[in-house]
Amino acid sequence: MISFTVNGRKRAYKGPPFKRLIDVLREDFGLTGTKEGCGEGECGACTVLVDRKPVTSCLVPVCQMEGRRIETVESLGREQRLGPLQSSFLEHGGAQCGFCTPGVLMTASVLPKSTAGDPLAIRRALSGHLCRCTGYQTIVESVAKAPRPKPRSRKR
């Protein structure tokens, strides 16, 4: 059994250890927001966060996830209540067909605050994502215009 956390919830997977993470997320856990584009790690559509770092889930065997923390696009908001980044994509046209959007959102969700409003830095950070619809400008604008979460105050 392989144990890890997905979107804040402890999960256990019993099955082939070399099954791809994307397949476990979609088929075994029903988290279909993560999309498969190329299946070769080239397009970025399947990007999820593993311990807060973007990872192409089509290349990772689930056996490498023991004890790790995974976040999928479902962690960013709900259909009835979108997160700030998702709302910005909706407002500024960052998604068209939407196929690349989950992976882009996951990478954008962990961009350092220093990239906010810097189109070149945003483009660099998102360079591993292929989009065939938008020409990238609206994606960059959506990321740049998304409200940044306020820093959490530390309790002493």
Image (tube, helix red, strand yellow):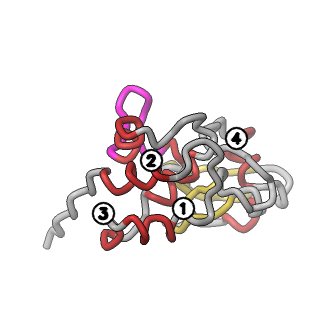
Name the residue that disc number 3 marks.
117
Is 78 a magenta residue? yes
State the CA–CA distance, disc 1 to disc 2.
30 Å
The kind of residue tagged 2 is Thr
Eye-nearest disc, 3 or 1: 3
Q: Name the side, left or right, on which 42 lies relative to 19.
A: left
Is 81 a magenta residue? yes
Name the residue that disc number 4 marks.
26
The kind of residue tagged 4 is Arg
Name the residue that disc number 1 marks.
69
Task: Quadrant for the N terminus, please.
Answer: bottom right
Mark closest to the chain's N terminus, 1 or 2 = 1
Please tell me which residue is depicted at 79% across the width and 55% down the height of the picture: 20
Does dot 3 land on a helix, a strand or a loop?
Answer: loop
Query: What residue span does the magenta drawing correspond to?
Result: 75-84
- Predominant secondary structure in magenta? loop
Q: Name the side, left or right, on which 126 lies relative to 155.
A: right
State the CA–CA distance, disc 3 to disc 2.
13 Å
Does dot 2 land on a helix, a strand or a loop?
Answer: helix
